[in-house]
Image (cartoon, rainbow, N blue to C red):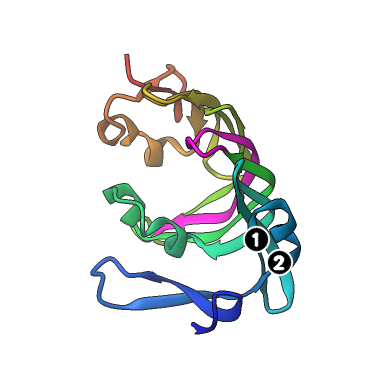
């Protein structure tokens, strides 16, 4: 990165599984918004290669993120998640958009976001393309609701769930695809996948019953 807190540029990067090297994936520039000072707030606008990608404002009412638009390779976005599943060599293109997202000083958030994963694949299954998927997320005063929808692909997954502070996140849906490929799902899904009786089709429920 170079510049100052008020104006500068840099490159977002993620560490590999070993934590020894960085993979750059998004150039970012930022500018301080002087107009926010009149609201007793501090704000920055962000862009990538001249294209606006979002605005962040922090003030006495909390934190506001507006017009967020980010794109990243799946492995770069998922690698920081502290879970072995996130390090399965995921591939494809991830994008997230959030027109408005507000968090109060206590950390309670409200807003809407859309996550799109195109060309989802995994290094564990070379040559196999799962599909294109969309997650819609709605937050209201700290409660989150999300829906998963398959846009295209060989592995079709759909469902919905919710999460709230102090409660285990829930999800209920279905997945179907090539039986030979998905038949191993119950053994690796920690009890969350149950056969429906139809080849290659499973009910998904979390927490498992």
Q: Neighbour class for label 2 at 10 Å: few (<14), some, many (≥20)?
A: some
Tell me which label, 2 or 1, sits earlier in the chain. Answer: 2
Q: Secondary structure at mark 2?
A: loop
Task: Determine whether 17 is above or below 84 in the image.
Answer: below
Q: Give the residue displayed 56% in from the left and 37% down from the top.
A: 104
Q: Give the residue displayed 49% in from the left and 82% down from the top.
A: 1
Answer whether residue 127 is visible to the viewer in this image.
Answer: no
Task: Determine whether 100 is above or below 157 in the image.
Answer: below
Q: Which is nearer the eye, 157 or 9?
A: 9
Q: Quadrant of residue 18?
A: bottom left
As for residue 127 lying within the magenta part, the answer is: no
* Residue behind mark 1: 43
Q: Give the residue displayed 34% in from the left and 25% down from the top.
A: 192
Asked if the residue under mark 1 is in contact with the one under mark 2, i.e. CB atoms within 8 Å, the reply is: yes
Q: Position of residue 134 (x, y in %)?
A: 62, 42
* Left-right relation of 196 to 145: left
Q: Position of residue 188 (x, y in %)?
A: 27, 36
Give the main secondary structure of the magenta stretch.
strand
Outermost residue, bottom side: 2
Q: Quadrant of residue 151?
A: top right
Which stretch is magenta? 104-122
Q: Quadrant of residue 185?
A: top left
Q: Quadrant of the C terminus?
A: top left
* Residue behind mark 2: 33
Q: Which is nearer the eye, 102 or 129?
A: 102
* Left-right relation of 169 to 118: left
Q: Give the residue displayed 50% in from the left and 32% down from the top.
A: 176
């Amino acid at each position: 990165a170079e510049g100052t807190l008020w104006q500068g540029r840099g490159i977002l990067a993620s560490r590999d599984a070993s934590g020894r090297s960085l993979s750059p994936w998004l150039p970012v520039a930022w500018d301080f918004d002087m107009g926010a000072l009149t609201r007793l707030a501090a704000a920055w606008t962000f862009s990538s290669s001249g294209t606006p990608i979002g605005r962040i404002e922090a003030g006495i009412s909390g934190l506001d993120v507006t017009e967020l638009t980010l794109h990243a390779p799946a492995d770069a976005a998922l690698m920081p998640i502290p879970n072995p599943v996130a390090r399965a060599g995921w591939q494809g293109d991830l994008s997230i958009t959030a027109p408005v997202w507000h968090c109060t000083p206590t950390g309670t958030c409200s807003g809407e976001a859309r996550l799109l994963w195109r060309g989802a694949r995994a290094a564990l299954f070379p040559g196999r393309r799962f599909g294109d998927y969309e997650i819609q997320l709605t937050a209201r005063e700290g409660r989150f609701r999300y829906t998963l929808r398959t846009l295209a692909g060989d592995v079709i997954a759909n469902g919905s769930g919710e999460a709230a502070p102090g409660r285990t996140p829930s999800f209920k849906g279905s997945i179907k695809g090539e039986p030979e490929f998905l038949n191993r799902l119950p053994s690796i899904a920690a009890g969350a996948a149950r056969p429906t009786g139809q080849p290659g089709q499973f009910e998904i429920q979390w927490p498992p019953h």
